[in-house]
Amino acid sequence: MSTLASLRLLRKPWNASKGNQSNATVGASSGWCQGLDIPNELFLVLGLVSLVENLLVVAAILKNRNLHSPTYYFICCLAVSDMLVSISNLAEMLLMLLLEHGVLVMRPSIIRHMDSVIDMLICSSVMSSLSFPGVIAVDRYITIFYALRYHSIMTLQRAVVTMVSIWLASTVSSTVLIAYYSSNTILLCLIGFFLFMLVLMLVLYIHMFTLARHHLHSISSQQKPPTTHRGGSLKGAITLTILLGVFFICWGPFFFHLILIVTCPTNPFCICFFSYFNLFLILIICNSVIDPLIYAFRSQELRRTLREVVTCSW
């Protein structure tokens, strides 16, 4: 492991179990317990792609006044969260490379302080990246089921309060997480928060899909042949699968890792699973790359503004 041990609470079980790893792998018929060697260059490339993508989303939303609405403000906050994930990843990787190659020489105390700062940045960005997809789901739910009252329910003031509250909660929770990283209670709270957001998104999007399917069925029942219903249902199902599938695939292994830390830190299977921690980090960074494609770039207005930003048509 590197001198800069980011996310100590997550890597600690793997580090602590190094002595037991050989015992766990003695009976293994293959080397799958040895983990996956992921080059630092891949972290850097994905971090840069995510940073550029999300920076463009933020610039496009700020540029176009038509996008100055609660919905796009939430998308902008998600982009900022994903940008922080990328920035913290890039900062960690660059510092690791500089330290390992002797380009940068620092006292251990300074490295520990920088480690804590980067850890806090990572944890706060992770918490906000988990929160804003749920907020966007709630906003879309209100848009569909309370369309006539949307502007009175989701006012700009309430949107600002929601965004500020999430950022404050993310900062405070990251501070607590770093301070008490060895406590299973903290990890259980983090796991519970992920499960809450997953269930929230699952319930809201399935309810929205069910309503849309019922609406399309009502329309297509008056048409012959009812191809609109089948096509619309398929498109809705694909969208729902992408939204929830990407969220679960990118975040699920990371939080399963946390569950194993709490339940079986010395079990041979768990020890083998811990060795793939870098893969779980790659999936989280991939989520930051995919989020703009799901939440932002599907908007025609935002794509048009994005072209203007890229061509510098200010």
Image (tube, grey):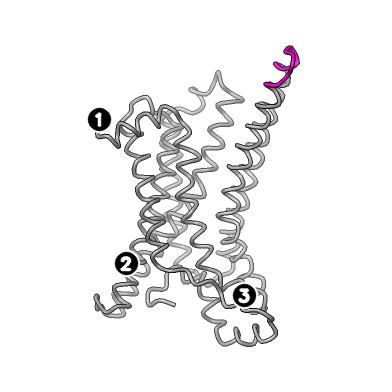
Instruction: Work out whether 192 lies above or below 216.
Output: below
Indicate the position of residue 253 as horizontal and vertical percent values: 59, 61
Please name the amino acid that badge 1 sits on: Ser
Residue under numbered circle 2: 94
* Magenta span contains residue 175: no
Q: Which numbered disc, 3 or 2, marks the residue that appears first in the sequence? A: 3
Identify the magenta region.
219-228
Name of the residue lying farthest toward the top: 222
Residue under numbered circle 3: 32
* Residues marked 3 and 1 touching at CB (< 8 Å): no
Horizontally, is 285 left or right of 218 in the view? left
Indicate the position of residue 182 as horizontal and vertical percent values: 52, 72
Residue under numbered circle 1: 313
Mark 3: secondary structure: helix
Q: Residue at x 40, y 31 (%)?
A: 302
* Magenta span contains residue 220: yes
